[in-house]
Structure formats: C-alpha cells, structure tokens
Image (cartoon, rainbow, N blue to C red):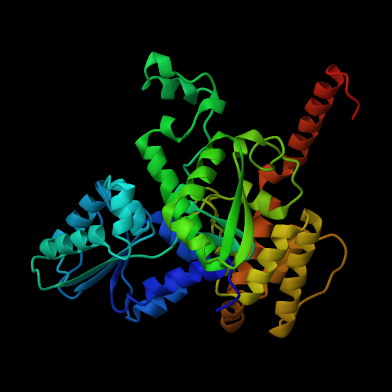
Amino acid sequence: MSAPGVLSFTQQGWEQVLAKMKRALVYLDAACAESLHWGCGSTRLLEAVGSPVCHLREFEPDAAGGGAEQPKAVFVLSCLLKGRTVETLRKIIRRSHFQYCVVVTAVSHAVHLTANHVPAAAAAELEGQHPVFEQLEEKLCEWMGNMNYTAEVLHAPLLLAPVAPHLALTPSFASLFPLLPQDVHLLNSARPDKRRLGSLAEVDATALTPELLLQIRCLVSGLSSLCEHLGVREECFAVGTLSRIIAADLANYAPAKNRRKTASGRASVVFVDRTLDLTASTGAVGHHGDNLVEKIISVLPQLPGHTNDVMVNMVELTALQAKDENHNVVAPGCLAQSNDTTARALWEALLSTKHKEAVMEVRRHLVEAASRENLPIKMSMGRVTPGQLTSYIQLFKNNYKALMNHCGLLQLGLATVQTLKHPQTAKWDNFLAFERLLLQSSMEKRGYLL
C-alpha cells in the first residue's frame, strides 16, 4: 500500500469490500460505483468476483433478483440503511434465491445510531457494538427465508472518488449545496415568530432540518475516517454558513474527539461555501480557465450515473461507420484510468497544465506509445491539430496488441480530439471575450482602472 493519502484511503476501503465478493452477485448504487470507478476500476471488481460471468447490477427497487444458481449477493451502498434503502433490499432479496447476503454501507454505525435517535450518552456506552447492523442481519435472514442462512452488515469508508493523488470528490454528496439567503424564509416557516432568523449569519445547526443535519453528519463521519487513515489531528476553518456548521459538527463529533487524542500528525481543514466565490471559480460560471480538462468536462456528454466523468466516443478505433452524428455512444471510453499507469500519469499532467501544454503532452504520449509498438508514425512538429492526433490514434486501430496495451491513453487522446473539434470549444474564446468586456464595463462604471 502506498503512503497514506486519498487514493490509499479509498483503495483500502474497497479491499475490505472486494474480499467479500467471491462468486457473488453484486449490487452497487451510483455513488459507490463512481468511487470504485476512480479508485480501483471495474477490472479489480471482476478479479474479486472470480466467476466466468460477473453479474453486476444497479441497486434500485426494480433490480433483477438472483436465480437458484446465484446463492450469494453483495450490496454496496453509499447511504444510511434506513427507509427506502431497507425496503429496496427487502424487495430484491425476497424475489431471489440468496443464502448468503453481505450489505456494505459507507455510513458508520455511529451515524446509524444518530439516525435512530439514540442519545449521545447511550451511544457512547455502545462503543464497539453494532446493534443496528445486527438487527438488519436478522431481517436479511428472515427475507432470505431461513434464519440459518448467513447475513453480514458492515461499514467501509467509501466516501471518496480519488480523481488524482491530491484531488478527491464525494459523489454521494453531489446534491449537498450551501444555504442561500432565500433559504432563511424556508427555515423560518418552521420556527415561532420570536425565534425567526434575520439572515444567514444567524443560522446554526439547531435551525436546520433533521434530514440536512443527518446528511452533514454522514459527511463528517466520512471525513473523520479519512483523518484517521492519515493519522492527523485536524484544525478546522470555515468560510460560509453551511461550512461553519459542518466544521463545528466535525469538531464536536464524539468518535473524532477520541481519535484526536492519539493522532500523531496535524492538518488544517478548510471548508468553503462555493457560492461565495463563484466569480473566482472557473468552469461553473465563466470561461477564463485555460485548462484542457475543464473544456473536456464542459463539452463532452456525461457518463450515465456519474457526476464527474464523460463519455468518449471510441468509434474511431472500430470498423463501425457512424454516419449519424446524433447516434448513441456504444461502450464509451472515459477519463478515469485507475489501472493504467501511463494514462494516469497523462491525466494528472492534464489536470495541472495549461491548454496548449496539455495538448502537446497528449501528442508526446501518443508518439512515444506508437514508437514502442513499432507503428509507422510520421513525426510532425509545430501546432497540434485534431487531425494530427487522430492520425496517431488510428495507427493503433488494426493492431489488437497495441490497442490493448494503450487503451487508457487512447481514450484520453480521443477525448482531447473530440473536445478540440466540438462546436462549443470554438465558441469558448468568444464567451471569454464577452466576459472580459462585461468586467471592463463594470469596473469603469465603478471608477476602477483595470
């Protein structure tokens, strides 16, 4: 295992889960699938299942159950084991022939106690025990139809989707959004007149809905697990109303208090409500970012079920003739290349370099890969064009061995080509010019000099 970091944290959590998957029917929800996608890749899951046929299904109420030849199931879920989630588990298991069920949740047992309204004092006495999980294990056996069958419920910290060694995202919290001024009115609707809030500055944890508080606690639990993996005692800073509440909850979270007593390292954690710096952030509201990855994510279609990856059309490397530009992408490529060292190195370079340098880096990697495979490449210097990159990529088309050896690199290369050729990319500079003109006009009206 590598040095402690966001990647090792995610991979360590997944190794606990993958160890349970041998010859199992696997159900994943979208957030856990995205964590696996960036952290380990589907290849690692196929290896863990170890069956000639891997049955992988999305966790949803209408998901197909397991037949008589599929006695084992593993459910990997990013959410609390409560309400609709438990009802979906019941429906799937009852229409199956399972004899062994494993349910993995990314939410710790301590948060499940909170969700079940167990007082803090009582929860402290239950340290090391897992009554909520044990009760669900009994229910699983009941739904399987035999109390002698095997059921396991366990927690694994699957919070992150590690996009790069120093950048990780939290797919299960994609909908968690900072509070806005108009939210004060909604919060006041549930409060008596004497306790009405005047502004966002007055909002604290007691003013939030139980659902939002529980979502915050789930995030805090995951962050505490990350700090434990890193071996650090964190000091929290916050900018914004929701960030202040999250930072306070992490500071007061009982398991985190116990962890800090033995932590040897130190870390500063800064929480920021992104709604407070939208004009400084690129991509979301502007076109002033000179980064290739930003443009790729902006113009290529989103990978279904994912919040942070795109579909790359791979038809250039096939014998298919796609005449209709509006055709659906079959078996798309993507940006995440967790099992390809060379492609991952290129991806990390693209994240941190400017557009021009990034395109040249893509060309360099394609040229080096073609040279290693002894492909008849024609060198050309100067400006990198989509046509030039396409000609390099098509060298791999009829060479199966070379195609397999560099599949990850070719996906990133095609993503670059399709972005450079996309009509929206051509408009990028126009949008940037309009934004600069608006900024200049605004500054002149206020009497400032640029």
Q: Is residue 377 visible?
A: yes
Whole-percent x, y for residue 105 in the image? 34, 60
Whole-percent x, y for residue 292 in the image? 71, 54
**Which corner quadrant of the image does residue 52 belong to?**
bottom left
31 or 252: nearer the viewer? 252
Whole-percent x, y for residue 358 in the image? 76, 60
171 or 148: nearer the viewer? 148
Location of the N terminus by quadrant is: bottom right
Up/down of 283 relative to 183, above or below: below
Residue at point 50% right, 29% down? 203
Q: Residue furthest right?
A: 449
134 or 378: nearer the viewer? 134
205 vs 445, left or right, is left
373 vs 10, left or right, is right
145 vs 43, left or right, is left
Whole-percent x, y for residue 419 in the image? 67, 53
Residue at point 19% right, 59% down? 135
Up/down of 272 relative to 409, above or below: above
**Which corner quadrant of the image does residue 132 belong to?**
bottom left
Residue at point 48% right, 20% down? 197
Location of the C terminus by quadrant is: top right
**Which corner quadrant of the image does residue 315 belong to?**
bottom right
Q: Residue furthest left?
A: 146
